Amino acid sequence: MSKKIKADSELIKECYKWVKHQFFTQYAAKHYAKAEFCVVQTKLTESKIGGLPYLPKGDVAPKNVDGETLRLLAQINCTDLKGLEHFPSTGILQFFILDNWEFGIENGRDGYAVRYYPEISEHYTEAELTKYYQPYAEDDECFPILQECKLQFELTEQTPVLDHATCVMLCGKYLAEHSIEVDYRTKEHLQRVVQHEYENEFSTYNKEDEDEENHSQCGGYPYFTQNDPRNEDKGLVDYNVLLFQLDSSFDEDGEEIVMIGDMGVMNFFIRQDDLQRRDFSDVLYSWDCC
């Protein structure tokens, strides 16, 4: 028989303890490569966002079915990822998108491309790329990279983030398993306080300046402004590794470096087996914004 009670301090304490235990039973801290931006003109083989891509001689930049060349979103010199489990430690990994207002997302697999070169070979110079790399642009202002930057990676550990959807699910499970009945407002209050307690104790985000935290990274736990698309389609659950994530960001003067819609974030996911085989032909791309 259910018992009706209020969300008093004792209930909150017990619920939080239970939710925390359940959450850490399912999730563990992960190593990842956190990316920082340095606004400079980059070299062709450096890790970067925007700018010109490394392009081996005889190769062509990816195009869509209409023959429009995709634009370089990001490039990673994989020596910068050395030590990150399952990820390559040599070669060049590149992410391209169609330069339109939807960032290629409405074009499905035709709107983006991921390329991996296991080793650096003879490649086109910057002067030669003016001929061999001419990306399509729907408009001069729609590309999300506003300043070319060098990417600098730091390998560190990321505590899992208890997102809203997971917190709601676990709090509901706690109430059901303990036969506790509360009204809707009390349940919302409980969920809100439990999530707040978790963030105070474990969040890896900068609590003093959370709005300016940059969540650009390789590996680790993904960040979303809306929902994880893999939760909405069972066919996507196998894309279980965050290959690359690019977050909207500002420089020290408050100028935009990356702006994805309204303070959005881009995610690229891959199956772990494919990553270990260095097969980047099947990568899931998504983005959302506030």
Image (cartoon, helix red, strand yellow):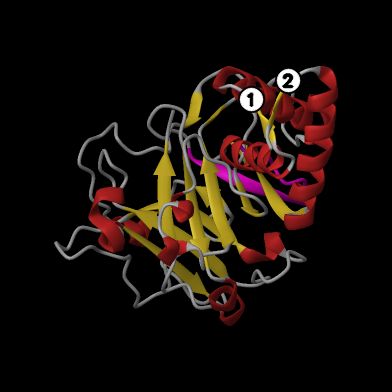
How far from the left and from the top, in percent, is residue 37? 61, 39
Q: Residue at x 60, y 23 (%)?
A: 188
Residue 42: in sight, yes or no? no
Mark 2: few/some/many CA within 10 Å (<14, 14-19, 20+)? many
Give the quarter of the image for residue 119.
bottom right
Q: Quadrant of the N terminus?
A: top right
In depth, the one of 25 and 206 nearer the eye is 25
In whole angstroms, how far apart are the C-alphas of marks 1 and 2? 8 Å
Task: Read off the magenta span.
Answer: 148-163
Question: What SS does tag 1 mark?
Answer: loop
Q: Label 2 is placed on what type of residue?
A: Ala
Residue drawn 63% across and 65% down?
78
Seen from the viewer's position, the closer of residues 66 and 3 is 3
Disc 1 to disc 2: CB gap under 8 Å: yes
Relative to 119, residue 50 above or below: above
Could you tell me which residue is drawn at 57 percent across and 82 percent down? Answer: 277
- Residue under the point 45% across and 71% down: 123
* Residue 118 is inside the magenta segment: no
Q: Quadrant of residue 103?
A: top left
Give the label on residue 182, or none: 1
Q: Which numbered disc, 1 or 2, marks the residue that appears first in the sequence? A: 2
Give the number of the mark in front: 1 or 2.
Answer: 1
User: SS at mark 2?
Assistant: loop
* Quarter of the picture holding the C terminus: top left
Question: Which is nearer the eye, 170 or 162?
Answer: 170
Q: Position of residue 15 (x, y in %)?
A: 78, 34
| Magenta stretch encompasses residue 158 | yes
Residue 7: give its label. Answer: 2
Considering only vertical position in the picture, is 181 above or below 277? above
Tell me where residue 163 appears, x and y as whole percent. 62, 38
Can residue 87 be seen in the rendering of this structure? yes
